[in-house]
Each structure stands twice: as C-alpha cells, then as structure tokens.
Image: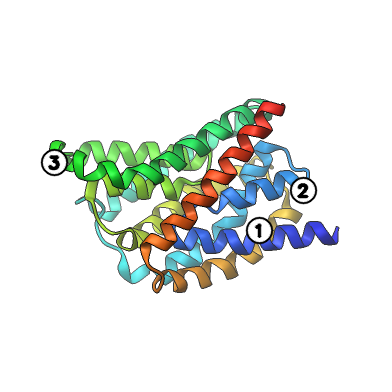
C-alpha cells in the first residue's frame, strides 16, 4: 500500500509537470495505474480524470498567451475539439480492455513519431501545402476524437500537427495546447464519471499530485529552452512506447 501510494503520487507529480511543459503525462500515469492493478481501459479513463485538474491549472497559468491556432480563431477550434472529445470518449467506453491493450502501443507510437519528426517535415510541407480553415478544423476534430479516446499524448499530437501547419516555436503553442487538451478532457471526464469507469482511490492520489506538478511545470516551461523540453519528452515517449509494445507482445 505504501509503495503503491508513492508510485502513484510520484507519477502524478511528474505527469502534471510533463503536461505543462510539452504534454505526454499519460506516458507516466498509464503504466503507474496498470502497475497498481487497474485494467487498461479503466486506467486510461482514470488517468484522464486524474490529470484533468492539473491541465486546468496549467491552462490558467498560460491564459494570457492564448492566440489563434494556424490562423483559425480559438472559439471554432474549441467547439470542434469538444465535439471530437465526446465522440472519442464514447468510443473508448465501447472498447474491450483486451482490444485496447493491443491498440495502446500503436497510439503511443503515432504520438511519438509525430512529435519526433513533425518539426523536420514542417518546412517542406509549408512550402508545398496551403491549408485553409476548413481542413484545419477537421484535423482538430480528429485530434479531439483522439484525445477523448486515448487521452495520453494528445497534447503531443496537437503540438506536432500545429507545428507542421504553422511552423511556430513550441513555446507559442503551449497556451492553446493546454486549453484544447482541457476541452477534450472536459467532455471525456463527464462521460467516464457518468459511466462509472473511474477507480477513484488511485485517481485522487494521481490528481492531487498532478495539480502541483502542472502548476510548477507551467512556470518552469517559461524558462526552459524548447529543445531541452522537446528532447526529454521524446526520450521518455520512446521508452514508454517500447515498454507497452513488450507488454502487448507478452499478452
């Protein structure tokens, strides 16, 4: 019990800070919850609920830096994110844990590849592709679905997609990222709580620690160089993705 408490508290603190810096906090909380004996779908739902308050704390710190995303105003982006989050969260609740165990490593891999290689292909795409508001809103809807379904690394996916389309510095994307992730998670949290898909004891431990980590991480994110933040996040993402592929292979 004592070791489990320390594991969950430490995971929540680290995950909250990671989400404030560049996203990917569920790379930490999902393994911690599964290690504590929580089934994968319930662990994903519980992780989303646990990290939600920390995400709100980060969004509050970043509130003055909000601006349009890829030329699209915040309000329509927020609306499609909410709708996508609802669709994704309902889809998760309909997915058996055995199937989600096999899907999860691939979701982590997609997020990791997007974060690692998105900035490299961004200049090439920007010279050849002009994307209007409509396709950007469709993409954001799909990101909302991804966020509601998986929760983990949705912030990384948004950062990767927006950096390809807009080619701006990571720090400039942090304020809208925290808002959009919180929007998708708001709908997901309501669905998961209503469906009774949350393990509350573990969730409350993670959530309390994540609030502290999110607040501290947001302030730290204003001072750290973007390359350090991105490099550390990619390294952890690769490590956790490999672990989940090993876990899926062992059945």
Q: Which residue is mark 1?
A: 11
Q: Which residue is mark 2?
A: 36
- Estimate the x, y position of residue 245 in percent, counting from the top left: 61, 33
Looking at marks 3 and 1 on the same chain, the residue that comes earlier in the sequence is marked by 1
Q: Is residue 48 left or right of residue 187?
A: right
| Alpha carbons under labels 3 and 2: distance apart | 48 Å
| Alpha carbons under labels 3 and 1: distance apart | 41 Å
Residue at 34% across / 42% down in the picture?
Answer: 140
Residue 159 seen in this snapshot: yes
Q: Is residue 221 left or right of residue 119?
A: right
Q: Is residue 187 above or below residue 13?
A: above
Residue 186 seen in this snapshot: no
Contact check, label 3 and label 2, Cβ < 8 Å: no
Mark 1: secondary structure: helix
- Estimate the x, y position of residue 43 in percent, counting from the top left: 67, 43
Mark 2: secondary structure: loop
Q: Which residue is mark 3?
A: 127
- The colour scheme is rainbow
């Amino acid at each position: 019990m004592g070791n489990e408490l320390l594991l969950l508290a430490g995971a929540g603190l680290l995950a909250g800070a990671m989400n404030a810096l560049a996203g990917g906090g569920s790379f930490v909380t999902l393994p911690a919850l599964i290690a504590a004996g929580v089934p994968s779908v319930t662990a994903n739902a519980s992780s989303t609920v646990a990290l939600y308050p920390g995400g709100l704390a980060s969004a509050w710190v970043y509130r003055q830096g909000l601006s349009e995303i890829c030329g699209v105003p915040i309000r329509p982006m927020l609306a499609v994110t909410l709708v996508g989050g609802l669709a994704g969260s309902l889809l998760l609740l309909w997915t058996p844990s055995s199937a989600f165990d096999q899907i999860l490593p691939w979701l982590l891999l997609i997020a990791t590849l997007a974060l690692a290689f998105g900035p490299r292909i961004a200049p090439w795409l920007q010279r050849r592709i002009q994307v209007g508001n409509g396709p950007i809103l469709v993409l954001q809807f799909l990101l909302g679905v991804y966020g509601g379904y998986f929760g983990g690394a949705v912030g990384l996916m948004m950062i990767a997609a927006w950096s390809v389309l807009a080619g701006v510095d990571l720090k400039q994307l942090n304020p809208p990222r925290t808002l959009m992730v919180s929007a998708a998670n708001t709908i997901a949290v309501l669905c998961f709580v209503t469906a009774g898909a949350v393990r509350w004891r573990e969730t409350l431990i993670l959530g309390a620690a994540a609030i502290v980590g999110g607040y501290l991480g947001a302030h730290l994110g204003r001072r750290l160089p973007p390359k350090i933040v991105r490099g550390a996040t990619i390294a952890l993402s690769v490590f956790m993705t490999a672990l989940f592929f090993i876990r899926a292979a062992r059945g």
